[in-house]
Amino acid sequence: FQAVSAHVTPCKNKTEVHHHTVYWSGTFSCSGCLWNVRSVEIAPSNSIAAIKTTQAIQDFQPDVVLFVGVAGGLKDVGIGDVVAAKKTYCYESGKDGTTFLPRPDTAEATPRMESWARSVTNAQSWLNRIKSPSTFQLSSSPHAYVGAIAAGEKVVNSVRSSTAKLLQKQYSDTLALEMEGYGFLRAAYYHPGVDALVIRGISDLLDGKSQADAAHSQELASHHASAFTFEVLAQ
């Protein structure tokens, strides 16, 4: 939330309350365009994300809804990289017997937002918007990807966990793991006039999560995801 707010000029009356939820109001100006922005921090959970997204769309009738946050990297990504979700797997959907049989369910970004995300990824101009004061040290410049992520109700902190192994076997194109993107995109799906996209900064690689968090990797990842987000809006 703080990383997003760094790109937004607050309104005079900077808070609004709808359905017992406090939104922060502001503007983002770019290239002769002015975006009105409403920002809210929510608790982790696909179901909470779906409820809050539905309420926000009904209250504000937005053109675009964006979920910005951090995620654990599963493959092909490093700390500080950004993943814009082409699709989000609900990896806990399935039949659980003597073994778990996945019944994959997915939610997708709207085509226009996926296209803009790919454009920003290719141009690399989002790097110029990074406002991170984090002390976390990267060995190279961050990269951005458009690909698959997975969202469930678990915090996963080992690549050897049963959830990580399930994803590696059954959802092998998954780049990152988080807890809200599926609910967010499913809610947006039922409002066809609204464009939707999930943007995640990679804050850890599942193994070594505690050490990465202690080194302020979440702060770094949040600022990178926000920089990418606002470059999408600027474009």
Image (cartoon, rainbow, N blue to C red):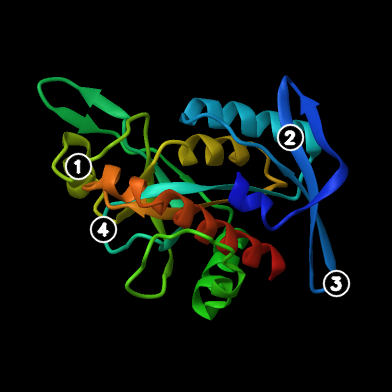
If you read the primary sequence from the N terminus, does the residue marked by circle 3 or circle 4 appear first? 3
Q: Give how far across and how far down residue 194 sits, in percent.
A: 70, 47
| Image quadrant occupied by the C terminus | bottom right
Q: Which residue is mark 2?
A: 23
- Give me the residue at 50% from left, 77% from top: 122
Q: Nearer the viewer, residue 133 or 36?
A: 133
3D distance between C-alphas at marks 1 and 4: 13 Å
If you read the primary sequence from the N terminus, does the residue marked by circle 2 or circle 4 appear first? 2
Q: Give how far across and how far down residue 54 sits, in percent.
A: 66, 31
Residue mark closest to the camera, 2 vs 4:
2
Q: Which residue is mark 1?
A: 158
| Image quadrant occupied by the N terminus | top right
Q: Which residue is mark 3?
A: 32
Which residue type does callout 4 highlight? Lys
Q: Nearer the viewer, residue 114 or 161?
A: 161
3D distance between C-alphas at marks 1 and 3: 46 Å
Q: Residues within 10 Å of mark 2 (few under 14, many from 20)?
A: some
Q: Residues within 10 Å of mark 4 (few under 14, many from 20)?
A: some
Q: Is residue 123 above or below residue 163?
A: below
If you read the primary sequence from the N terminus, does the residue marked by circle 2 or circle 1 appear first? 2
Secondary-structure class at tag 3: loop
Which residue type does callout 3 highlight? Gly
